[in-house]
Image: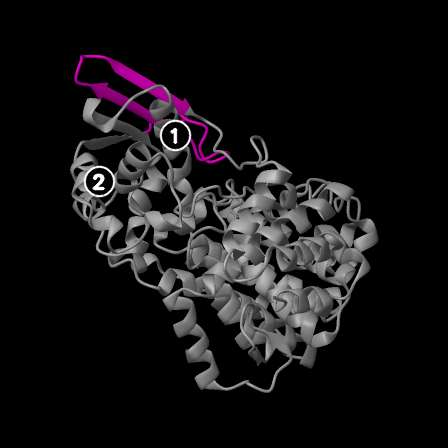
Amino acid sequence: MGNAELNSMASPALQGDPAAREASCSQRISAFVAGLSFDGLPTAVIESAKRHLLDTLGVGLIGSRQPNAAAALEGVRGIGGGSGQSSVWGTGFRLDAPYAAIANGVACHVLDYDDTHTDSITHGSAVLAPTVLALAEELGASGQEAIAAFAAGWEVTARVGLAARGSFHKRGFHTTSVAGVFGAAAAAAKLLRLSAEQTSHALGLAGSQVSGVSEYLSNGSAAKSFHPGWAASAGIVAAHLAHAGMTGPMTVFEGRYGTFKTYGLVDECDLAALDAGLGERWEMTRVSIKPYPCCHFAHAFIDCVLDLRLQGVTPAQVKALHCVVPEIELPLICEPFAQKLRPDSPYAAKFSLPFVLAAALTDGRIGHDTFTPENIARPDLLELADRMSYRVAKPGETAFPKYFPGWVEARLADGRALVRRFEINTGNPDNPLSREALEAKFRGNVRGLMSNEAAGRVISAVDSLEDTAVADLVRTLAQD
């Protein structure tokens, strides 16, 4: 990649500075991260950060009670790091920050109920909340510092995903893991107060820890939930190494063996997206909050089926459900189709479009109890799932990837064909969850784990985070 091509990628804000025009993608991003401060954040970004922190804390707390999260905690405790100052949410354990970040990252993603930046296909908060809270608690950082680090991490995570244009997924990598390690390194660098040069090295070192193969789809394994935890931990490690003087490649993104050539399809990537509008357009405000605890690609399809149910359609009336699905979504929710028709675990069922649509039409809801061993074996749901088919959406036929759309045609026994389309999935910033719905989701997730009063204290602590220390917020998670 020549200098002329690299220079054309510079953001408008940097084009007036000859030195900045010669900088690598990593160096330009790092200058933004190092120069960011809480006082420079727009109010909308601060409020968005607090919304997503609250949502992620609730998801992480209920996730901490899941077997895979418990196994992850046992595993990292077996490695060591048990004398640290960073809390494992919902437990009495404290670990060194990288280990706490693994445990909390797994807990945040294990139920697939965490938020998503739809354009970049990244679950950033499941990486960044564990990163920021673990390291901020260890360092005694303020809430303002945590919010700035969280925002910086989200901007980097989202832009790496945007630049990939879905090609990480096409290559068989989980974009959250690939992009998330860079966001985690940026957030950790911010909390460690690294210079722009040190931050560039942290990003370069993070590039050597990129991971996250999608083979977890073969058996619905716990590996997917490990990805955010590992990205969080690796980002913290990268920032600490850079702080100590280790160096990384300045061309970790665009280089001959850079991230987009080794993990993506470089001809499909858009490296200009790495810093386009950086500091002017905030991707932090473009993150969707999930209303259903399953793969986000399925959500708008669930909305379609629930709307059909509201119109009086019953399972007995349905001869067939036919869906139009964007190509990138197919490996996650539709293929191999025989496996999706008979998910072999509750976690696999979260990635089965036939199963979740059958459950939504039959039960009128999708909740945590949808995904139990008993429920995924129900004959009525499996029989209805067998009536589903799909075709691949043509390019430009839907609003993907800006939104995760749903398109369902129900063919009824009386000969009617009813079509429902939801271009904007519920919870997307263009169709957002209300504040009341967000709090209801949080309280529902922590019900049985803490009292209503304790839940209220967590909500208040997040709402006033800029005026308190992170340790005070984390302390509320253990109150009963």
Residue 270 against residue 219 in the figure, above or below: above
Residues tagged 2 and 1 counted as in contact (Cβ below 8 A)? no
Residue 378 against residue 22 in the figure, above or below: above
In which quadrant is the C terminus drawn? bottom right
Number of callouts in the render? 2
Q: Residue at x 64, y 60 (%)?
A: 454
Tag 2 residue: 381
> Does residue 203 show up magenta in the picture?
no
Helix, strand or loop status at disc 2: helix
Residue 37, image x, y percentages: 79, 56
Q: Which residues are magenta?
A: 393-421
The Cα atoms of the two marked residues, 2 and 1, are separated by: 20 Å
Tag 1 residue: 406
Q: Quadrant location of residue 253?
A: bottom right
> Does residue 402 show up magenta in the picture?
yes
Q: Residue at x 44, y 33 (%)?
A: 400
Earlier in the chain: of badge 2 and badge 1, it is: 2
Instruction: Name the side, left or right, on which 233 lies relative to 198.
Output: left
Residue 222 against residue 292 in the figure, above or below: below
Q: Residue at x 58, y 34 (%)?
A: 432
Instruction: Name the side, left or right, on which 269 lies relative to 453.
Output: left
* The furthest residue to the right: 39
